[in-house]
């Protein structure tokens, strides 16, 4: 059996969200070294603040300042910090109930060893030197045995409030396509497209999945399909993707390769975007050294009859 492929992959994108009045006040407060909670209908002070009451689901805006000191309610030791975490040396993740709050805030607690941490220990916020209005304005918590400091008396009104945040979402993982898709990828290296046929319904899956999702049986009969195919449906892309050197607008389509029982994705080139249509017959265009087609272009054949691909829409 050929070796199954695997490769490190990263999925990363910036997540942008606007802030309502409560979250805006909370994050702006952190920028100003002020911690704000919100009072719920049952009298509890929630930190971090919620925008809606957890009991009544009504909107709540009664902001309450709490102290930057508090008590650890529970914790877990992080012996190997990961990229992007608050500290680069081992630390504890801790739930800290700040003085004046009734709920706990999760953040890093800087401690030398696990034995230095315990439930009930007193801590305080260590503020970041540069603050922008984000949860990272709290650099971490640190042990503290003094009295809570005097509150500022803030009501949540600040100049230049933070109205939105951008959070980078990232997932690092090792992907293995499995036996079936490894064979598919290796075949693409030879400019061939190979699917697998279900022994029950006889549908040919491209890319292959190793099993038929309809019949629930394993597939192992390899079938070469294409290379030509039919555009079943498509969309016109008008927004340029980061790090993708393709000018907009361009067309991305579902293409049913000849002999396949499932349409795959591909970019359409060699034709004005507004002339692409359902039923257009296309063929792959390869670039030197590529492991997959760069795009598909019209073959010049007459359009396929709708009845030949309607089941693949």
Image (cartoon, rainbow, N blue to C red):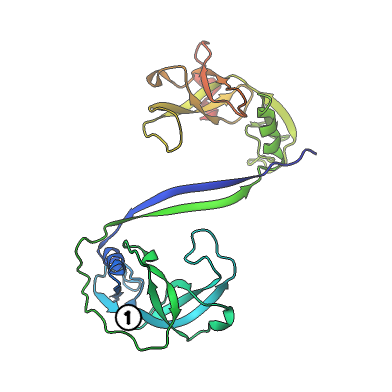
**Neighbours of disc 1 within 10 Å: few (<14), some (14-19), many (20+):** many
Q: Residue 158 appears at what percent x and percent y?
A: 20, 67
Mark 1 lies on residue: 67
Between 91 and 238, the one nearer to me in the picture = 91
The image shows a total of numbered marks equal to 1
Between 249 and 116, the one nearer to me in the picture = 116
Vertical order, 57 against 224 (above or below):
below
Q: Residue 291 appears at what percent x and percent y?
A: 62, 29
Q: Residue at x 63, y 42 (%)?
A: 213
Residue extending furthest front?
129
User: Position of 27 compared to 76: left or right?
Assistant: left
Vertical order, 264 against 6 (above or below):
above
Does residue 179 appear in the picture of this structure?
yes
- Quadrant assignment, res 55: bottom left
Vertical order, 122 against 294 (above or below):
below
Q: Residue 113 appears at what percent x and percent y?
A: 57, 78
Secondary element under disc 1, as helix, strand or loop, is loop
User: Position of 60 compared to 266: left or right?
Assistant: left
Does residue 202 appear in the picture of this structure?
no
């Amino acid at each position: 059996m050929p070796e199954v492929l695997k490769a490190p992959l990263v999925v990363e994108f910036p997540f942008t969200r606007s802030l309502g009045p409560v979250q805006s006040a909370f994050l702006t407060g952190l920028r100003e070294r002020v911690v704000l909670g919100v009072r719920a209908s049952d009298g509890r002070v929630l930190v971090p603040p919620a925008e809606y009451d957890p009991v009544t689901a009504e909107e709540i805006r009664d902001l309450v300042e709490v102290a930057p000191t508090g008590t650890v309610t529970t914790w877990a030791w992080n012996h190997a910090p990961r990229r992007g975490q608050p500290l680069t040396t081992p630390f504890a993740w801790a739930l800290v109930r700040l003085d004046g709050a009734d709920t706990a805030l999760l953040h890093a607690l800087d401690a030398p060893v696990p034995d230095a941490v315990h439930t009930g220990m007193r801590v305080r916020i260590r503020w970041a030197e540069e603050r922008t209005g984000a949860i990272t304005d709290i650099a971490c918590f640190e042990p503290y045995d003094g009295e809570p400091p005097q509150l500022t008396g803030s009501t949540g009104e600040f100049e230049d409030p933070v109205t939105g945040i951008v959070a980078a979402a990232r997932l690092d993982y090792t992907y293995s396509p499995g036996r079936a898709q490894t064979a598919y990828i290796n075949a693409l290296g030879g400019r061939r497209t190979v699917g697998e046929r279900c022994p029950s319904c006889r549908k040919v899956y491209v890319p292959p999945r190793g099993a038929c999702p309809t019949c629930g049986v394993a597939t192992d009969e390899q079938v070469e399909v294409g290379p030509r195919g039919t555009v079943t449906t498509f969309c016109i892309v008008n927004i340029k993707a980061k790090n993708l050197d393709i000018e907009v607008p361009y067309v991305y389509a579902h293409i049913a390769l000849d002999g396949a029982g499932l349409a795959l994705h591909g970019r359409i080139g060699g034709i004005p975007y507004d002339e692409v249509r359902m039923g257009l017959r296309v063929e792959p265009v390869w670039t030197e050294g590529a492991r997959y087609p760069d795009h598909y272009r019209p073959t010049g054949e007459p359009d396929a009859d709708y009845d030949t691909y309607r089941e693949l829409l």
